[in-house]
Image (tube, rainbow, N blue to C red):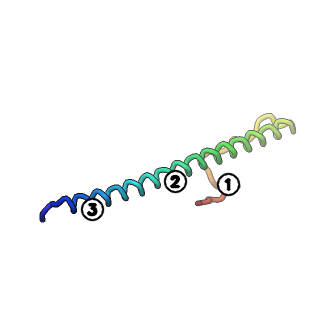
Amino acid sequence: MNITKETIDERRVALLEDLNKVRAQGAELERQKLENIALQNALTGAIQQCDGFLKELGNDEPELFDMDSDSNSDVENNES
């Protein structure tokens, strides 16, 4: 196999295309990560609000919840 300027240029173009695809995937993953963090913050706020309501009703100690449990989830797995 002979290496020519043309074969190197073709390979370089293919590598640049791959790099652009990987960068786009990274940007999409970052967007999903930020969306996930926002959802976690919203859920944490909702839990705190429930805790506040329970305290107002006279139940000073809300039930503890398992952060890793999804059995009582109000959120469905939403893949965009």
Residue drawn at 69 percent across, 45 percent down: 42
Residue 10 marker:
3
Q: Position of residue 68 (x, y in %)?
A: 59, 47
Measured as percent of width and height from the top left, residue 11 is found at: 26, 60
Spot occupied by residue 3 in the image (x, y as percentages of width and height): 15, 60
Residue nearest the observer in this picture, 49 or 14: 14
Q: Residue furthest right?
A: 57
Camera-near label (1 vs 2) is: 2
* Residue at screen point 61% across, 49% down: 35
- Name the image quarter holding residue 56: top right
Amino acid at circle 1: Ser
Mark 1 vs 2: CB contact within 8 A: no
Could you tell which of marks 1 and 2 lies nearer the N-terminus? 2
For marks 3 and 2, the one nearer the N-term is 3
Residue reaching furthest to the bottom: 1
Q: Quadrant of the C terminus?
A: bottom right
Q: Is residue 80 above or below residue 65?
A: below
Which residue is nearer to you in this view: 2 or 66? 2
**How many angstroms separate mark 1 from mark 3 (CA)?**
51 Å
Mark 1, residue position? 73
Picture layout, residue 70 above or below residue 45: below
**Side (left or right) of 45 relative to 57:** left
Residue, disc 2: 28
Residue shown at the point (74%, 39%) measured from the top left:
48
